[in-house]
Image (cartoon, rainbow, N blue to C red):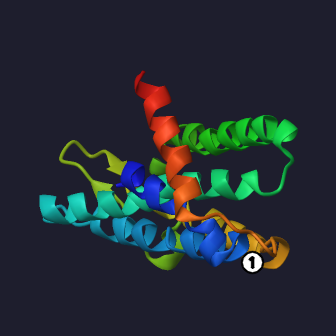
Amino acid sequence: VGATLRIFYSFVIPTFGGRNWTVISNFSLIFPSVLIGIIVQDPTTSYETMILLAALCGLGGGNFASSMSNISFFYPKKYQGAALGLNAGLGNLGVSGIQFVSPLVLGYGIFGVIGVEPQTFSNGTIIWLQNAAYVWVIPVIITTLLAYFYMDNLPGIDSSLKQQFVISIKNITDAFF
């Protein structure tokens, strides 16, 4: 889902504006995070439900493409490579961060204040599996608010579907040939 959404998300910045789209797309990540946190607590959750929520997590994969196309409008061509590289590197830092944080938060009842109960296995092991999803909610809210208050929509951005399509085809052909 994330890979497919990258195609569409890369076209939306000129239509909705960088700030508007960042707020909308970032805020949409709260929904799957909260739902996954809820459903992983129920061992009878169906496989189909898990697949649907995993697909909703693909919204984050699409966000990466819109951030890349948004950055392109802020820098002159000679600085775009560095800006895009920094964005890609820092974006991937989030993946590394969650791979580091998830195992740590699974072992502690950090969200116990809101009534979140641990899962207990037959051997007595206790974990809070939902923490891996809930740990994202606060950073998503913070970054959404930061985008809302501190980002701008650049006036006069015009990028036709034809221009975007040419770039997409070039990127596809470069990747395979």
- Looking at the rendering, which quadrant does residue 10 occupy? bottom right
Q: Residue furthest top?
A: 177
Residue at (53% x, 58% y) in the render: 162
Quadrant for the C terminus in the image = top left
- 98 in relation to 135, above or below: above
**Image: 92 above or below 53:** above
In this view of the protein, which residue sits in the foreground, 138 or 129?
A: 138
Residue 166 horizontal side relative to residue 79, left or right: left
Give the residue drawn at x 50%, y 72%.
30
Residue 19 in percent (x, y) is at 72, 73
Whether residue 68 appears in this view of the structure is: yes
**Image coords of residue 105 (percent x, y):** 52, 50
Residue at image position (67%, 72%) is 144
Q: Nearer the viewer, residue 88 or 70?
A: 70
Q: Which residue sits at x=53%, y=47%?
A: 166
Q: Which residue is mark 1?
A: 148
Mark 1 nearby-residue class (10 Å; few <14, some 14–19, many ≥20): some
Q: Nearer the viewer, residue 148 or 121?
A: 148
Q: Position of residue 32 (x, y in %)?
A: 40, 68
Q: Quadrant of the N terminus?
A: bottom left
Towards the viewer: 51 or 59: 59
Under circle 1, the secondary element is helix
- Asked whether, in this view, residue 103 is left or right of residue 96, the answer is left
